[in-house]
Image (spheres, helix red, strand yellow):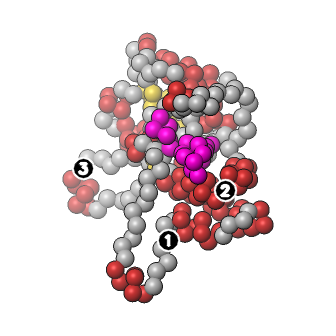
């Protein structure tokens, strides 16, 4: 599925499967790629993401779809949702006809080998699920710099997650839950030497250019999800003083309304 940059669509058991409701951003790049025109847009009021409902639906598609879904969650560091899904399978083993241990082994790439095989084995490389590496959702654990490192750099980065571009972010990713959001125009960080220390510290980040970016309605919808579903505590908007930058504040206000 080359046109799905999030890796949310995969061919499994000779069928196209949506293995990640969470990461599908609704851009629609997959529509033009389907040779059978089997993919269409549906506009409706969507319920907030629910991992248990997703698992219940995926169980009808078989073990391989479940494995692909869990691997996608693991690769995108969505550990909270991964735990919810595994817990559901653990407590509802009468709802499926495969072994949970097989799923766990495949998701975490656990190899059961004899002692002789262990002497010559190597840890397997994590399989990439087809998502663009640059848009893969990640959270970073901040480390305190050593005295030597501290003397070598004037300031450390306060960025705690990736991606940050508003088109690429997943608005219900775990790092946005109940967080303080900084919504910044693209040029802001390049204009302020103290951007990280004085403005980004303690906040999660999303960036956009209200003049040059396309698909502003997608931005408004993502900001709405950040408010309604991730329930961000606050939104701080930073923009340049030029008139064309005012659109980023308008988008935030539209989403809040």
228 or 102, which is in the foreground? 102
Q: Is residue 180 left or right of residue 98?
A: left
Q: Quadrant of residue 141?
A: bottom left
Residue 9 colored magenta? yes
* 3D distance between C-alphas at marks 3 and 2: 52 Å
Q: Which residue is mark 2?
A: 62
Q: Position of residue 168 (x, y in %)?
A: 48, 36
Q: Nearer the viewer, residue 83 or 8?
A: 8
Q: Is residue 23 visible?
A: no
Look at mark 1 in the image and give the residue it sits on: 110
Examine the rendering and report whether any part of residue 189 can be seen: yes
Q: Start and end of the magenta stretch?
A: 1-23
The picture places residue 134, in percent across and down from the top left corner, at: 39, 42
Question: Which mark, residue 153?
Answer: 3
Q: Which secondary structure, mark 2?
A: loop
- The structure residue drawn at horizontal position 50% and vertical position 37%, both measured from the top left corner, is 4
């Amino acid at each position: 599925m080359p046109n799905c940059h999030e890796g949310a669509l995969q061919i499994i058991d000779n069928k196209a499967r949506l293995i990640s409701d969470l990461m599908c951003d609704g851009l629609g790049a997959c529509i033009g790629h389907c040779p059978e025109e089997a993919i269409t847009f549906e506009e409706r009021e969507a319920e907030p993401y629910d991992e248990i409902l997703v698992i219940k639906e995926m169980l009808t598609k078989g073990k391989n779809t479940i494995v692909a879904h869990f691997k996608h969650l693991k690769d995108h560091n969505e550990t909270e949702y991964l735990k919810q899904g595994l817990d559901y399978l653990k407590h509802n083993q009468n709802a499926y006809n495969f072994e949970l241990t097989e799923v766990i082994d495949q998701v975490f790439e656990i190899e059961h080998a004899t002692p002789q095989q262990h002497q010559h084995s190597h840890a397997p490389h994590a399989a990439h699920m087809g998502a663009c590496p640059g848009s893969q959702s990640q959270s970073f654990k901040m480390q305190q710099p050593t005295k030597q490192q501290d003397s070598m750099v004037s300031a450390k980065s306060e960025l705690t997650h990736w991606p940050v571009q508003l088109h690429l972010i997943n608005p219900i990713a775990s790092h946005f839950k109940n967080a303080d959001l900084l919504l910044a125009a693209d040029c802001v960080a390049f204009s302020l030497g103290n951007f990280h220390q004085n403005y980004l510290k303690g906040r999660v980040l999303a960036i956009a250019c209200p003049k040059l970016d396309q698909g502003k309605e997608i931005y408004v919808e993502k900001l709405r999800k950040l408010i309604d579903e991730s329930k961000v505590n606050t939104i701080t908007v930073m923009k340049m003083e030029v008139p064309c930058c005012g659109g980023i504040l308008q988008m935030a206000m539209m989403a809040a309304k």
